[in-house]
Image: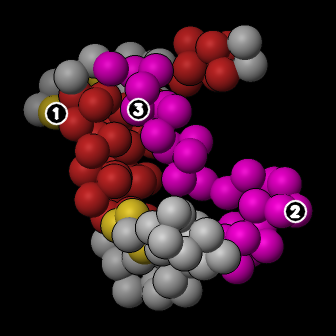
Amino acid sequence: MVYNHAAAFYIYGLYMKGQIEKAYKVIWEMIHDPDKADLIQRGQLSVFIPNYYRGAFRQSPRTAGRSSQLFNTGATPWLYRCYFDGLFGLKGDIDGLHIALKLLHSLVNSFK
């Protein structure tokens, strides 16, 4: 299984270590592809991040990638933190808000 909460921690760690492109790639893999076949395989619309996706592609290819449909997870708030702190580079501290935008670089590279 792919636990999205743990995956969000991984993404956040990648951003903190400066591995921007790898973090962006993992986020892109976690969110839904607008492709109809992907939506059918996952078994849900892209309105939330579920607790987990089923794994074991070799053992159970029919159900691999299927959404758990469980919304009781902290994955979504952590994924938002990955977006704002990591991708958008927004950091608040005692001196105010600091912006170190990484979005443009990631988007440009994702279309190559």
Q: Dot 1: few (<14), some (14–19), or many (≥20) neighbours within 10 Å?
A: few
Is disc 2 surrounded by few (<14), some (14 to 19) or many (20+) residues within 10 Å? few
Question: Residue at 32% of width from left, 72% of height from top?
Answer: 74
Q: Mark 2 belongs to which amino acid? A: Lys
39 left or right of 73 in image? right
Along the line of sight, which residue is nearer the eye, 75 or 92?
Answer: 75
Q: Position of residue 31 (x, y in %)?
A: 60, 54
Q: Name the residue under label 1.
A: 93
Q: Is residue 37 left or right of residue 31?
A: right
Q: Is mark 1 on a helix, strand or loop?
A: strand
**Mark 2 secondary-structure assignment:** helix
Are circles 3 and 1 on residues that touch, CB within 8 Å?
no
Q: Is residue 8 shown left or right of residue 33?
A: left
Front one among 112 and 81: 112
Give how far across and how far down residue 78 sits, in percent: 33, 57
Label 3, label 1: how far apart the Cα atoms are: 23 Å
Tell us which disc is closer to us: 1 or 2: 2
First-in-chain label (1 vs 2): 2
Q: How far apart are marks 1 and 2 (CA)?
A: 43 Å
| Relative height, residue 64 to residue 97 (above, below) | below
Depth check: give the residue in front, 102 or 61.
61
On-image quarter of the C terminus? top right
**Residue 23 included in the magenta stretch of the image:** yes
Residue underneath mark 2 = 36
Give the amino acid at mark 3.
Answer: Ala
**Disc 3 designates what residue?**
23
Confirm whether residue 110 shows in the render.
yes
The colour style of the image is secondary structure
